[in-house]
Structure formats: structure tokens, C-alpha cells
């Protein structure tokens, strides 16, 4: 039998002054139809504004809810955060019994201080917002003039080079009967409660489900957690009919098997342009998404890739190094134009041309080659600007994405600024990862290279873990 009891709340509601009736709230949850424990549950009283976060430490949690505001916690201070685990940011809530200088410190697992806040705070509840960085484990230490406490929090997001920040969000004001301390939660009969369950899904994203009710008797609630759909951008280079001579080539039989696999998994095949539509909400994911891309502009894009993609009704983006066009083993501009004008049975244009710069240089590392910063900026504008002009003139396409040569310069704000100034719609990097379309950075899109010996099944690891 599937274990279901995740959270038990012992509920005492005020019936008459000084009298209470006891009932039990039981929470169960499912994730894609199977049992899965939540990481935490946030309980909020909408009427009074009070709230408490319960972190899941074991099978059953017990929480006392009462209409008697006289119940208090003997602890002089407390600290907790929600959601926990978190992806990019989390709310840190502290409660102190008396006004005091307060030191809130976040350290990593080795004890190194990451960020801290020191300020004088009044008695009561206060809220801070923490934006995470690279680390997964953080130790939160709260210290006042007379006491200290600590808690752990987990960052499961992929925040890259984000600088950790801790910001004070202010005092939490609640009604007299809404003061929440420790494990006690003040609740009056008739109040509307909101229960929010948080869990980390198999792709490492925090998912949630919310239940609204005004309970007055025993009841069972079910959190229905759904895995968020994610996107993987596949990065190919050259296709070959023979045995690959280097790791960046892929045999056509293997490529054909890749396409069959994508069809068998019923993925939603997207173009780079679709990412813009997903970001604006004009398009929705119906399943996990796949974007097929090719770098450099090899002639095999036209002679081998396009025919196979057409057979399977697949879309793709071809990133060109424009100065290489017309040279041995690379596309001619006539072939580029033909690729851009191919149509499927519905009259759509499945193949989009993107830029891989003019000459394929290291964009970030090249800064050391220039005597002045202005000279470096001129280099960036030439590499990105000239390439885009060539592609626009040949294809007539205006929605053009950039692929970084060697993956150099991912998340570099100066390169992003120059790309935006030249009218690029986004940037595909070489960072290995999948991404959530609701939180994607269109100018720092990760991708997965498919090399000569890459098993296509590997993308499952990025979509689900």
C-alpha cells in the first residue's frame, strides 16, 4: 500500500470562550501519480496574515493550531526559510522576543561567511530575501544580544555566477490573534487558510501546489505535484556518411537514430524562435521540448541534415560562421538561401539561420589582444554585427540568434549588451544543462553537445535530474 500520511495537524478551534474542539487535518501528496514527500509546507491564515513554515524531517509532522492567542513559545528567537529547498531566491523569516541588535549570517558548509546583515530590529517578525549563488548548502545563523539559533537551507537551482545577496524586506505585521511563534499557530474558526506544499522535482526545480480552505473538522487534503516541463537544446556540428574522424562529427545513421528516438519520446520539437514565444506566453509547452541546432555551417547541413530532418518533420537552427561560407567543406551562400526557403507540408519554414560570428574567435578571451577597451568593443561589434548583416541580407530573416564560438563568454554582460545592440534575439551557450522555459535567460541559453559517440538517451538525465 502506498504510504500517504505526510503531515498531521492537530487542530483546536474555539467554539465558546475557553472551550475547544479537536480535529485532525491529514495531508497526502502525489507526484506524477506516485507518492513523494514534500520538502516543506507553508500554512497561512489569510484573515490575519499569520503564517508558519513546517520543514519535512520525517513521516509525520504535528502542529498545534488554536484560537487562544495566549499560547507562546519559550524560545527567545527563531529563524526559518521558505521555500526550502529553493531555486533562485528564498524568504528568511526571523522572530525575536525583544528589541535587539541582530546579526543574520549565511555561511557555506565549510563555515565560510557568504553574506551577512547587521541591524537593530524591534521585537516581532521580520523578513529577509536571499538570492542564492553557486553553493547548495547554506547555514543561516541568527544572533541577538542574548541568544542565537541556526537553520540549514538548500539551493537546488542553477544560479551560475549570480552574486549572493541578502536584503531586508521589513517587519511582518499581523493581528493580535495572528502572532505565530515556534510550533504554535493561532487560528480562529471561520478563518480562511492557505496550505502550500513545496517539493524538489526530478529536474531539480522547486514545484508547488496550493490548497485553500476554511477547515472546521477533520479532513484530508492532497497536494498534486506536477513535474515542470523542461527544454534541451541539442548542439550538432558536421554529419558524415563515413566513420567520424573527430568527436565533433556524427555519423548519419546515428543522426537518423537520434531523430527516431525524439519521435518515439513524443518531445515537442521547437525552433529558437519558439523560445521567444514561450518567454512571452504566446506559446505553451505540451511536453518536454527539444531544440535542434548545428554549429559552424558545414555543407552537410544542407546535403545530409536537412533531408533527414525533413523526413521526420523536424525543425532546426543552423548557426553560421559567415566568413567560412563558400570555402571547402562549408555551405555556399546559395545553399544557405535554399535552406532558409525550404517549406514543410504546412507551408512553414522549418530551418532558421543563426550567427556563429564572422570569424569564430574567442569573444571573451580576446579582450587581452586589444590595447584599449574601445578597440575590444569595436571587435565585438564587427564579429556580431557583420555576421548578422550577412545573414539578414541573404535570408531576409530578422529574428536571429547568436551561438558563442567555443562557448566562450557565456553570461558576459558586455557581450550580451553588444548582442542586444546589434539586434540579436538571444544567445545559445555551451553550458551543459536543460532549462525551465518560465525562468530561462534568453541571452544565456544552455545546450548539450551531441558528439560522435554520445548516446542520445543522455538527454533524459538533463530533462529529469
Image (cartoon, rainbow, N blue to C red):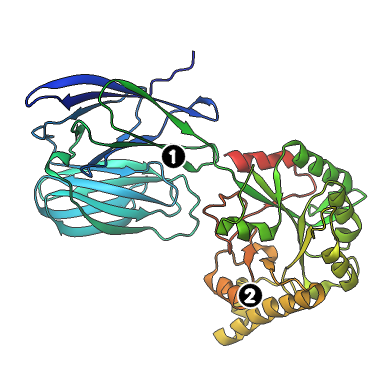
Residue 341 appears in view:
yes
Front residue (pair 416, 195): 195
Q: Nearer the viewer, residue 421 or 407?
A: 421
Relative horizontal placement of residue 140, taking residue 96 as reference (left or right): right
Judged from the image, the secondary structure of the residue bearing numbered disc 2 is: loop
Left or right, 63 with respect to 396, comes to: left
Can you see residue 327?
A: no
On residue 418, which mark appears?
none
Helix, strand, or loop for circle 1?
A: strand
Q: Residue 203: x percent and y percent? A: 55, 41
Q: Tell me if mark 2 has few (under 14), some (14-19) or many (20+) residues whose alpha carbon lies within 10 angstroms of its own.
A: some
Residue lying furthest top: 1
Above or below 389: residue 137: above
Query: Which residue is painted at 48% across and 27% down in the image?
Result: 30
Residue 17's place in the image compared with 442, above or below, is above
Percent from the top left, x then y, of residue 254? 84, 43
Point out the tag, 2 or 1, that comes first from the N-terminus: 1
Residue 208: numbered disc: 1
Quadrant position of the C terminus in the picture: top right
Residue ID at (79%, 58%): 348
- Whether tag 2 and tag 1 are in contact, CB under 8 A, the answer is no
* Mark 1 closeness class: few <14, some 14–19, many ≥20 residues within 10 Å: many
Residue for badge 2: 423
Residue 19, picture quadrant: top left
Q: Quadrant of residue 24?
A: top left
Image position, residue 280 (x, y; %):
56, 59
Please indicate whether residue 207 sits to the left or right of residue 389 in the image: left
Considering only vertical position in the picture, is 24 above or below 455? above
Residue at mark 2 to residue at mark 1: CA–CA distance: 37 Å
- Residue 438, horizontal then vertical, whole percent: 53, 52
Which residue appears at 60% of the width and 46% of the height?
230
Amino acid at each position: 500500500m502506498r504510504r500517504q500520511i505526510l503531515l498531521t495537524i492537530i487542530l483546536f478551534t474555539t467554539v465558546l470562550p475557553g472551550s475547544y474542539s479537536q480535529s485532525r487535518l491529514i495531508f497526502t501528496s502525489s507526484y506524477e501519480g506516485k507518492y513523494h514527500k514534500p520538502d516543506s509546507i507553508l500554512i497561512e491564515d489569510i484573515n490575519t496574515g499569520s503564517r508558519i513554515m513546517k520543514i519535512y524531517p520525517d513521516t509525520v509532522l504535528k502542529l498545534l493550531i488554536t484560537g487562544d492567542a495566549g499560547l507562546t513559545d519559550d524560545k527567545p528567537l527563531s529563524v526559518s526559510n521558505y521555500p526550502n529547498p529553493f531555486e533562485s531566491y528564498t524568504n528568511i523569516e526571523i522572530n525575536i522576543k525583544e528589541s535587539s541588535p541582530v546579526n543574520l549570517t549565511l555561511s557555506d558548509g565549510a563555515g565560510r561567511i557568504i553574506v551577512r546583515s547587521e541591524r537593530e530590529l524591534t521585537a516581532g517578525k521580520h523578513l529577509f530575501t536571499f538570492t542564492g549563488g553557486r553553493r547548495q548548502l547554506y547555514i543561516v545563523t541568527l544572533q541577538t544580544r542574548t541568544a542565537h539559533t541556526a537553520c540549514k537551507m538548500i539551493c537546488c537551482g542553477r544560479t551560475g555566477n549570480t552574486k549572493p545577496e541578502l536584503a531586508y524586506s521589513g517587519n511582518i505585521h499581523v493581528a493580535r490573534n495572528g502572532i505565530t511563534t515556534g510550533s504554535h499557530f493561532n487560528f480562529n474558526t471561520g478563518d480562511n487558510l492557505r496550505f502550500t506544499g513545496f517539493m524538489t522535482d526530478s529536474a531539480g526545480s522547486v514545484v508547488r501546489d496550493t490548497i485553500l480552505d476554511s477547515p472546521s473538522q477533520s479532513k484530508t487534503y492532497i497536494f498534486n505535484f506536477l513535474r515542470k516541463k523542461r527544454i534541451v537544446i541539442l548542439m550538432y556540428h558536421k554529419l558524415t556518411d563515413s566513420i567520424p574522424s573527430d568527436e565533433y562529427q556524427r555519423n548519419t545513421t546515428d543522426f537518423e537514430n537520434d531523430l527516431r528516438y525524439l519521435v518515439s519520446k513524443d518531445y515537442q520539437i521547437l525552433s529558437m524562435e519558439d523560445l521567444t514565444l514561450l518567454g512571452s506566453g504566446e506559446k505553451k509547452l505540451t511536453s518536454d521540448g527539444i531544440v535542434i541546432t548545428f554549429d559552424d555551417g558545414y555543407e552537410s547541413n544542407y546535403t545530409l541534415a536537412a533531408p533527414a530532418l525533413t523526413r521526420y518533420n523536424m525543425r532546426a537552427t543552423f548557426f553560421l560562421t559567415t566568413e567560412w561560407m563558400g570555402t571547402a567543406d562549408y555551405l555556399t551562400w546559395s545553399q544557405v538561401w535554399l535552406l532558409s526557403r525550404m517549406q514543410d507540408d504546412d507551408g512553414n519554414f522549418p530551418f532558421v539561420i543563426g550567427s556563429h560570428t564572422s570569424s569564430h574567435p574567442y569573444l571573451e578571451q580576446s579582450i587581452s589582444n586589444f590595447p584599449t577597451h574601445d578597440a575590444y568593443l569595436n571587435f565585438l561589434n564587427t564579429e556580431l554585427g557583420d555576421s548578422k548583416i550577412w545573414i539578414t541580407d541573404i535570408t531576409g530573416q530578422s529574428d536571429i540568434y547568436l551561438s558563442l564560438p567555443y562557448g566562450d563568454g557565456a553570461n558576459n554582460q558586455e557581450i550580451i549588451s553588444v548582442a542586444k545592440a546589434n539586434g540579436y534575439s538571444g544567445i545559445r551557450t555551451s553550458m551543459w544543462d536543460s532549462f525551465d522555459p518560465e525562468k530561462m535567460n534568453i541571452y544565456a541559453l544552455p545546450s548539450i553537445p551531441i558528439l560522435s559517440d554520445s548516446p542520445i538517451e543522455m538527454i533524459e538525465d538533463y530533462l529529469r535530474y
